[in-house]
Image (cartoon, grey):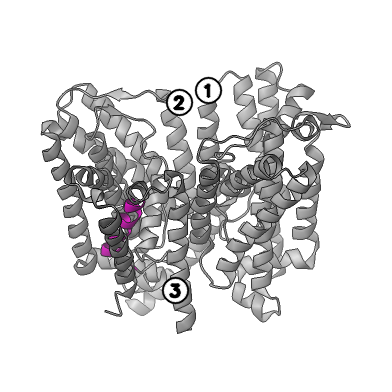
Amino acid sequence: MNTERHGFKAILLRHETILLFVVLLEWLYFNSVGPRFGSVDNTFDVMRHSVEIGLLALAMTPIILTGGIDLSVGSLLGLCAILFGKFWRDMGMPIPLAMVCTIGVGALAGGLNASLITWLRLPPLIVTLGTFSLFRGLAEAITRGVDTFTNFPASFIFLGQERWLGIPAQAPIFILVAVGIWLLVHHMTFGRSFRAIGFAPEGTRYAGISVERRLAMVYVLAGIIAAIAAIIYTARLGQAKADAGMGYELYAITAVVLGGTSIFGGIGSVHGTLLGVAAIAILNNGLVHARQPREVAGMLTGLLLILALTSSILPKMLATWRARRQTSIAKTPITT
Amino acid sequence: MRRYFRELSVAGALAVVLLALAVFAPAFYQPQPLLSLLTREAPTLVVACGMALVIISRQIDISVGSQFAVCSVCAGLLAAKGMALPLVFACCVAIGGLMGALNGVLVAGLRLPSIVVTLATMVTWREALRWLRQGQFVNLPDGTQWFGLSQRGGQWMLIIAALVILVSLAIATRHLSAGRFIYAVGTDAEAARLAGIRPQLTTFAVFVFMGALVGLAAMMNVVQSPQVDPKSGSGLELKVIAASVVGGVAISGGRGNLWGVFVGVLLLASISPALTHLRVEAYWEKAIQGAIILLAVVADGLRNRKQR
């Protein structure tokens, strides 16, 4: 048992070290190809552009750890961005109040996912597929597909485009969320139960943990973080449109899985997710500096994802193959 | 009756929508627009049939939209090069089958989770297509549209083709052993293996079949217009998954049938024209689509709760 855990830990460690190595390799390569790639300005640019997807990936990590998935975060980002604009421009709320209301909407939307998944025990994939359509559809209906919110005050745009204490102004928020989720998942008994749920929900229930309540919390948290991402997105672009964050859920899932979290739940880490986000962000930005078309970055992300999956599953496959060969050998004298 | 409760209740919902249209917007039933609507939805029905099989075998394929675009563009390019139409047709189906086979190898051979594999192939195919074609439309040569028939003839041909595929698959999944294998594998792969079925082979075959159907559907879409749009098929994966789920296919595998999927496709397809005819703004379409999906699964959840 002990050695098994140790070996298991070693594999985990290996995945993240390999990924770190890949990220460093990417960085070195692009640094040698694109002269401006390694500059401070560009590094901050990469950070700025990856904050929203990074936030969604952070929110997705606990969800996937419990064996669930949330396809609706990108659509929710769009809906929250629109509602934020609506609160500020059409309802005349001051920016801070509009932010609070937006985060409240995010929590409510997460609560909708959570209640359908826990009370009715519906599969997360299909519930969030429904809310994926619903949230994006509401955003389109509210703006009638054309309305765009612009002319936000400079004090708000600051959050997305300026620097604060020498770093991009949205970076502290991201770091705060990242540290919070990391502590939750890796250092609190509350958060450690996510992985237990991913391994065996029924077993976790018998261990005295209220699985439903924790699952609900994870989805509500994702809603809140999606709302924060929406606010930062609006500040970065200086506008809110109904198509905000389209396809972001897929990037977030890619980053999480690339970071070594098993899509079946139970295995994974927050720092892995952060490395996954970095790998994708550097690839996207670096290829532009290397004068490659943007589409290549997308293709490579897809291939990288398949490679990461294959490498993570190979040891397990070898083990089952070996075990099955042994059982078939053991069975041979009985059947013949 | 009890057995098909789920399918019948969706059919009831469809009947209500159609009845409401008959009362409030009889213009919906003009033959030519209705024929055009059904023709537009014919490829969707074909892909939805394949998706239902994939979901029944307890997998999912979200790369069908990208596959659809790749097949469409390939078919357009081959036709533009002067290849005979039947040959283009065969190539299109083969290309779809090959892309399905790649998914199948990764899912069944390497036992990777289908949602992540098809997520990866979806991104890869879509970006590769955009890279190679830069979003260019392909102009089709004369005589390709509607297979060189009249518009009306072509439309009827596509609708009948889609219905033939639906009926033959519905019969096959019910009465052929290969069709029952899919249900067996989706219900319990290990039990199926012990019963002498090869689950990995079945899964692989289902993915290849899905790809071939996507190729077929792409061809059915290409012949409807004089140009090939490289963005055709975007969002198709969610549309057909929604149609399957609304039609009573359980995402946990092993349950559902193609008649339900047929009703699901019709119900989702009737939303957009219903909104236009009832003078609701068309922007609500996606929200209503989402609400219908949620309603369908909530009804399932409540029923299961009662039975528990």
Residue A110 lies, in percent from the top left, at 63, 58
The amino acid beneath tag 1 is: Pro
Q: Residue A330: which numbered mark, if any?
A: 3
Frontmost of labels 3 and 1 is 1
Q: Is residue B18 left or right of residue A152?
A: left
Quadrant in which residue B216 is drawn: top left
Q: Earlier in the sequence, mark 3 or mark 1?
A: 1
Frontmost of labels 2 and 3 is 2
Determine the CA span between mark 3 and mark 1. Answer: 56 Å
Q: Quadrant of the N terminus of chain A?
A: bottom right
Q: Residue furthest top?
A: A35
Per the image, the residue denoted by label 2 is B131
Determine the CA span between mark 2 and mark 3. Answer: 53 Å
Magenta highlight range: B256-271
Is B65 included in the stretch rendered in magenta?
no
For disc 1, the neighbor class at 10 Å (few under 14, some 14 to 19, many from 20) is some
Determine the CA span between mark 2 and mark 1. Answer: 7 Å
Per the image, the residue denoted by label 1 is A293
Residue A101 lies, in percent from the top left, at 72, 52
